[in-house]
């Protein structure tokens, strides 16, 4: 490509992928990293095609010498490797697979950038060797000495017979070839990238937070208790009639203010605004002091609303909480309590 700005960008992307893979390994990481390789390959191929094709025919200047044929392009190989990487990443759930893609990508882009810098620092005049014309060779293997056009014209004007041997050559349009290969590669790359996106967004075997959590049997949670369920990140509350029940609530332990985890403090005393009487036992945010009653209703602090609720289902005495179904907390949280 020879573009100074392309290689540092690729190197930065590769280093970013390596950093993310080391900090937070995920399944199918090779497929996600290969998706970035496909985008890089398409971009490099587009820029190379534009550089090789040159300006449109109507504005392209006439050249006295025949234009040098372009060398082989490596971007289709990069694109093919990206497609293979996506296929392998979707099949194998290798959490460190992104490193298999990103490390060679970083080494390759770093070496290419180094070569570009060396070429730019090379003194002018040393890059191009002096042109040495080669003798013409016919299809029969005979060597023809090069003859200047003015000499041929002089001999033809003097009546000399000039024989020209025509060799049939199959002409291939460079623009047509680039157009066909580019659109074919673009279609294959987009198809592979779409497969990676579908794999990333399609839910499969969700467990823990975001799934349905089996909390246990109703008898395990006496009235008035608050039980912390770490797997689902919620408090399972069994409200009494005095607390607005009876019934069960699943309160997301995330504070609606800035997201701090809200603990239940059974030894914390605070004046209940509803009764004006001091009461012991509140949900109290340790970050900024937002305070909530037994049903997660905000009574004090900077929180914009009450604690959010999760959907509860009770069947055959068993409690299930859908942590993927969360409703915004309101002042009437207790009215949503589910009775056993």
Image (cartoon, rainbow, N blue to C red):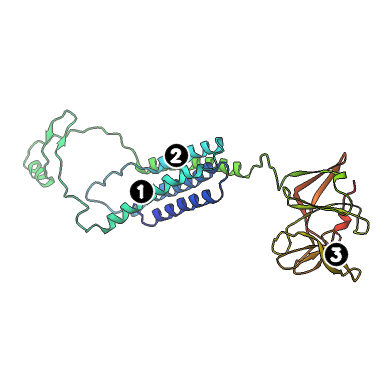
Secondary structure at numbered mark 1: helix
**Number of numbered tags placed on the structure image:** 3
Residue at 73% across / 49% down in the picture? 232
Residue on which the image places disc 2: 81
Whichever of callouts 2 and 1 sits on the residue coming sooner in the sequence is 1
Above or below residue 15? Residue 279 is: below
Q: Position of residue 166 (x, y in %)?
A: 21, 33
Q: CA distance from mark 2 to mark 1?
A: 25 Å
Q: Secondary structure at mark 3?
A: strand
Instruction: Give the number of the disc on residue 74.
Output: none
Judged left or right of residue 290, residue 25 is left
Q: Which residue is mark 1?
A: 53
Along the viewing direction, whichever of 186 and 129 lies nearer the viewer = 129
- The Cα atoms of the two marked residues, 2 and 3, are separated by 64 Å
Which residue is the site of mark 3? 280
Across and down, in percent, residue 116 comes to 32, 54
Q: Give me the C-alpha separation between circle 1 and circle 3.
A: 79 Å
Counting from the top left corner in percent of width and height, residue 133 is at 15, 44
User: Marks 2 and 1: which is nearer the front?
Assistant: 2
């Amino acid at each position: 490509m020879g573009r100074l700005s392309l290689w540092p960008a690729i190197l930065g992307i590769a280093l970013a992928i390596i950093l993310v893979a080391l900090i937070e390994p995920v399944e199918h990481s090779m497929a996600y990293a290969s998706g970035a390789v496909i985008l890089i390959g398409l971009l490099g191929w587009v820029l190379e095609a534009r550089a090789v094709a040159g300006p449109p025919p109507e504005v392209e200047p006439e050249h006295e010498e025949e234009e040098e044929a372009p060398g082989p392009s490596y971007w289709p190989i990069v694109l093919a490797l990206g497609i293979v990487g996506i296929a392998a990443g979707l099949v194998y759930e290798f959490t460190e697979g992104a490193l298999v893609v990103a490390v060679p990508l970083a080494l390759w882009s770093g070496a290419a950038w180094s070569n570009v810098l060396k070429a730019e620092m090379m003194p002018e005049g040393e890059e191009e060797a002096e042109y040495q014309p080669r003798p013409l060779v016919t299809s029969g293997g005979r060597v023809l000495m090069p003859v200047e056009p003015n000499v041929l014209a002089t001999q033809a004007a003097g009546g000399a017979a000039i024989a020209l041997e025509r060799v049939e050559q199959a002409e291939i349009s460079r623009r047509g070839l680039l157009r066909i290969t580019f659109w074919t590669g673009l279609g294959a790359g987009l198809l592979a990238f779409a497969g990676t996106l579908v794999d990333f967004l399609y839910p499969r075997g969700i467990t823990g937070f975001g799934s349905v959590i089996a909390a246990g049997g109703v008898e395990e949670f006496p009235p008035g208790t608050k039980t912390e369920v770490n797997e689902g990140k919620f408090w399972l509350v069994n409200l009494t009639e005095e607390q607005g029940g009876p019934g069960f609530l699943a309160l997301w332990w995330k504070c609606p203010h800035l997201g701090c985890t809200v603990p239940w403090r059974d030894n914390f005393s605070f004046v209940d605004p509803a009764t004006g009487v001091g009461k012991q036992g509140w949900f109290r945010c340790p970050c900024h002091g937002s305070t909530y009653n037994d049903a997660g209703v905000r009574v004090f602090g900077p929180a914009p609303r009450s604690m959010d609720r999760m959907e509860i289902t009770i069947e055959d005495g068993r409690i299930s909480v859908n942590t993927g179904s969360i409703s915004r907390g309101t002042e009437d949280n207790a009215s949503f309590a589910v009775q056993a």
